[in-house]
Amino acid sequence: MSKTSPIARWCPLLAAVLLGLILAATALSAPSAKLNAKFIPERLGGRTTLEFAFSFTVPPSELVPPPLTQIELRYPDRLGLGLSGLGLATCAAGTLEVSGPTRCPPNSVMGYGAALTAVVLGTTIVSESAPITMLRTPDQKGHLAVLFSAEGTTPVDTRIVFPGLLLPAPSPFGGQVNVGVPLVPTLPGAPYISVVRLHATIGPRMVTYYEQAGGKTLAYQPLGILLPKGCPRGGFPFAARFHFLGGTVAAARAAIACPRRR
Amino acid sequence: MAVGLALAALFAGAIPVTTGSARATVSPSRAHASRQLKASDTAHLHYTSASGSLLYEEGLASGTIPGSMHVHFNVGATFTGTFTIYTKGGSIKGHGAATPHGSGVYESFAGSLHATGGTGLYVHAHGRAGLYGTFNRNTYGLLVQTTGTLLY
């Protein structure tokens, strides 16, 4: 008969308890996410601009959310993004990084937005609003790709460019945009920048395109995302997962309610 | 006899058939599918109506299996859809899927389509074909090319 030492018997239990404590601590420090979405205007069968926003709330022990590393945003099935007339031109990542969105073709712009970022310097939270431009870029890995350009000035003067890929998603979603968010350093020894909230629009709102006709350049507004003629039960569903540095994940859902019948 | 592959054109809305080499042989492997047709077709489809990402298109297919095509397809992260092609000998129906790539006004795509049945001469139609084409993001017009084998 073999005799197991008390330490050997207690080790698995201790490991399980420690793992539980670690997971509980991680859950306690993980931010919670809120997602909002809206069609402007919301007319079934009509053209629209999609406005979406997300924000994070941190537990009392934290001042700001951990740095964001990845976003997965799922959008409703039958949303006519591909018929929107947006992204008729492309902008290369190199052009965007060196010269900014103003040097990209106007017909590559798909939308605008802004992100509120924050960094803890000592015990002070320093916030900054960074405008965002979304532009179509050549496909990556066989998937439709969008570039996000965010520019900050104070306290961190930087321009970051990061790609988003349009991927298939299971029902009731029509697809999902996977965005890899780069870590943005601040001061030596200080943490990376955190995203506190973000709002953006994809659609013709505030977007001007140009076309050649009869030797002239004509400005026009893209048609916009085509909404289906029917509304899904429960509204148009959206879902997002946010990945943070350190491995924590926050999820959120939202639905755009069906318009009232007239 | 040449009424099988125009079905591919129907999938994308406007499929033009580029080449047309038809060959009919007897295939004893299936009780109903006694004929085999190798075909290449092209169709040009035009926009008829849309709802969200769903497009309904119609047009003419030419090549091995000429006819009139009707296509419903979903312009999503991947292109998926169903088609029916109406020929002199009957209709052929099926479905297809393709991955879009490229960018700009013209978006190309590549994938495959499957014939799953039909009417008349093609009531037992089945087969698989390569599916290629371009989608005009301004006019929603489709140019579709298919190459494959139809059993019926």
Image (tube, rainbow, N blue to C red):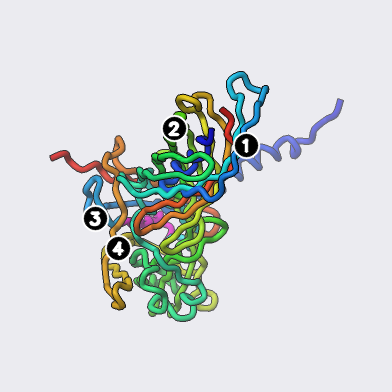
Which numbered mark, 1 or 4, is in the foreground of this view?
1
Dot 3, crowdedness within 10 Å: few (<14), some or many (≥20)? some
First in residue order: circle 3 vs circle 4: 3
Q: Chain of mark 2?
A: B
Q: Which residue is mark 2?
A: B88
With respect to residue B21, does A130 lie above or below? below
**CB atoms of marks 3 and 4 within 8 Å:** no
Q: Which residue is mark 1?
A: B23
Which numbered mark, 1 or 3, is in the foreground of this view?
1
Q: CA distance from mark 1 to mark 2?
A: 18 Å
Q: CA distance from mark 1 to mark 4?
A: 47 Å
Q: Position of residue B23 (x, y in %)?
A: 62, 37
Which numbered mark, 4 or 2, is in the foreground of this view?
2
Part of the protein shown in magenta? A51-62
Q: Chain of mark 1?
A: B
Q: CA distance from mark 2 to mark 3?
A: 48 Å
Q: Residue at x 29, y 44 (%)?
A: A228
Q: Residue at x 26, y 42 (%)?
A: A229
* Badge 1 and badge 2 both on one subunit: yes
Which numbered mark, 3 or 4, is in the foreground of this view?
4
Q: Which mark is residue A40?
A: 3
- Say whether residue A194 is magenta: no
Front residue of A36 and A67: A36
- Say whether residue A55 is magenta: yes
Q: Position of residue A86 (x, y in %)?
A: 36, 61
**CB atoms of marks 2 and 3 within 8 Å:** no
* Badge 1 and badge 4 both on one subunit: no
